Image (spheres, grey):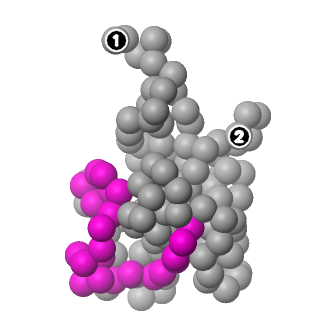
């Protein structure tokens, strides 16, 4: 199957660290990845810029407002009818109180020891490690 024959669903995610180096994660409430931990993010809506999608998804899933920074990396993951093309951006929290919402059943700041105990979405740890974005605490 060639790339042009594959239905690509554009998604955007947020890589957010707090002042102590912990990483912001959400537990997915719905497929794909239901019950697993991942970074906040989701589908980019038609006509929406990645930056707007990241800001919206973080607010919906965590209650936090962020400023979107540089593109850190991208990955492709299998989707029911194609692939999710996921673009992950470095973000800084500007306001809000952390709480799980929308598609998240839980939200937390995690350090490296806690991250090691969580069931995460496929490929998350490898991508974060490759991009040097694992928790620093």
Q: In what element is the residue under mark 1?
A: loop
Q: Is residue 114 left or right of residue 11?
A: left
The residue at 39%/64% (across/down) is 36
Is residue 78 one of those drawn in magenta?
no
- For label 1, count other residues whose C-alpha is less than 10 Å away and answer few (under 14), some (14-19) or many (20+): few
Q: Quadrant of the C terminus?
A: bottom left
Residue sitting nearer the eye, 15 or 26: 26
Which of the labelled discs sits on residue 1, or is there none? 1
Q: Is residue 83 left or right of residue 48?
A: left
Q: In what element is the residue under mark 2?
A: loop
Q: Is residue 25 left or right of residue 122?
A: right
Q: Which residues are magenta?
A: 104-128
Q: Quadrant of the N terminus?
A: top left
Q: Is there CB contact under 8 Å for labels 1 and 2?
A: no
Q: Which residue is mark 2?
A: 45
Q: Quadrant of residue 110?
A: bottom left
Residue sitting nearer the eye, 103 or 124: 103
Which of the labelled discs sits on residue 84, or is there none? none
16, above or below 18, in the image: above
Q: Quadrant of residue 38?
A: bottom left
């Amino acid at each position: 199957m060639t790339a042009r024959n594959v239905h690509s669903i554009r998604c955007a995610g947020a890589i957010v660290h707090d002042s102590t180096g912990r990483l912001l994660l959400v537990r997915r409430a719905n497929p794909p990845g239901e019950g697993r931990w991942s970074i906040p993010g989701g589908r980019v809506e038609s006509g929406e810029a990645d930056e707007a999608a990241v800001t919206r998804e973080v607010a919906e899933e965590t209650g936090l407002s962020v400023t979107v920074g540089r593109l850190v990396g991208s990955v492709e993951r299998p989707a029911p009818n194609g692939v999710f093309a996921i673009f992950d951006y470095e973000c800084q929290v500007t306001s809000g109180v952390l709480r799980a919402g929308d598609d998240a059943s839980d939200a937390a700041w995690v350090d490296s020891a806690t991250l090691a105990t969580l069931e995460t979405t496929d490929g998350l740890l490898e991508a974060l490690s490759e991009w040097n974005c694992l928790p620093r605490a």
